[in-house]
Image (tube, rainbow, N blue to C red):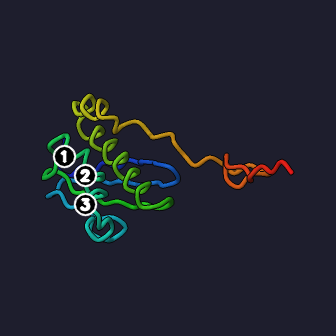
Amino acid sequence: MANTEVIAAVGRRKTAVARVVLQPGNGTVVVNGLDLKERFPRAFWQDMVLLPMKMTNSMGNFSALVRVHGGGVVGQAGAIRHGMARALVKADESLKPVLRKAGLLTRDPRVKERKKYGLKRARKAPQYTKR
């Protein structure tokens, strides 16, 4: 990989879409103009976002610039994780088996089920009254 190369990838989760740009750097992650710790204050969310870099031992090799929109906080963290894993594979194809085994390259297909008419939610029905 050339030192001036930038790698871009898209990650998705639920209704969140993240555009991840990896470039050679010191491991900083900027999400929508904010530092990772500001944007995702909980340690669980930060670990979720940084998991692909930790698994491939590339924490200090790349810096990430991320634009994410849609969904909630967990969905956005999952979308960033997916995009980061895809970008790392573009940067180095030898990382693919490690990330594939951890399930980080697979787009999680679970989304909210639509509400059906006559019901309160997707599956919850109003209470049945016999008389």
Image marks 1 and 3: residues in contact by CB distance under 8 Å: no
**Label whose residue precedes the other's in the sequence (1 or 3):** 3
The single residue placed furthest to the right in the displayed view is 131
Residue 28, position as x, y percentages in the image: 20, 61
Query: Which residue appears at 23% of the width and 36% of the height?
Result: 92
For marks 1 and 3, give the CA distance: 14 Å
Q: Mark 2 points at which residue?
A: 50
Query: Which residue appears at 29% of the width and 37% of the height?
Result: 89
- SS class, disc 2: helix
Say what amino acid the circle numbered 2 marks: Leu
Q: How crowded is mark 2: few (under 14 residues within 10 Å), some or many (20 or more)?
A: some
Q: Mark 1 points at which residue?
A: 54
Q: How crowded is mark 1: few (under 14 residues within 10 Å), some or many (20 or more)?
A: few
Say what amino acid the circle numbered 1 marks: Lys
Q: Residues within 10 Å of mark 3 (few under 14, many from 20)?
A: few
Q: Does 71 appear above or below 37?
A: above
Residue 117, position as x, y percentages in the image: 78, 51
**Label whose residue precedes the other's in the sequence (3 or 2):** 3
Q: Name the residue under label 3.
A: 43
Q: In this view, does 5 lie to the left or right of 15?
A: left
- SS class, disc 1: helix
For marks 3 and 2, give the CA distance: 10 Å
Camera-near label (3 vs 2) is 3
Residue 36, position as x, y percentages in the image: 27, 64
For marks 2 and 1, give the CA distance: 6 Å
Residue 51, position as x, y percentages in the image: 25, 47
Query: Which residue appears at 44% of the width and 54% of the height?
Result: 75
Say what amino acid the circle numbered 3 marks: Ala
Image marks 2 and 1: residues in contact by CB distance under 8 Å: yes
Q: Does 66 appear above or below 95?
A: below
- SS class, disc 3: helix
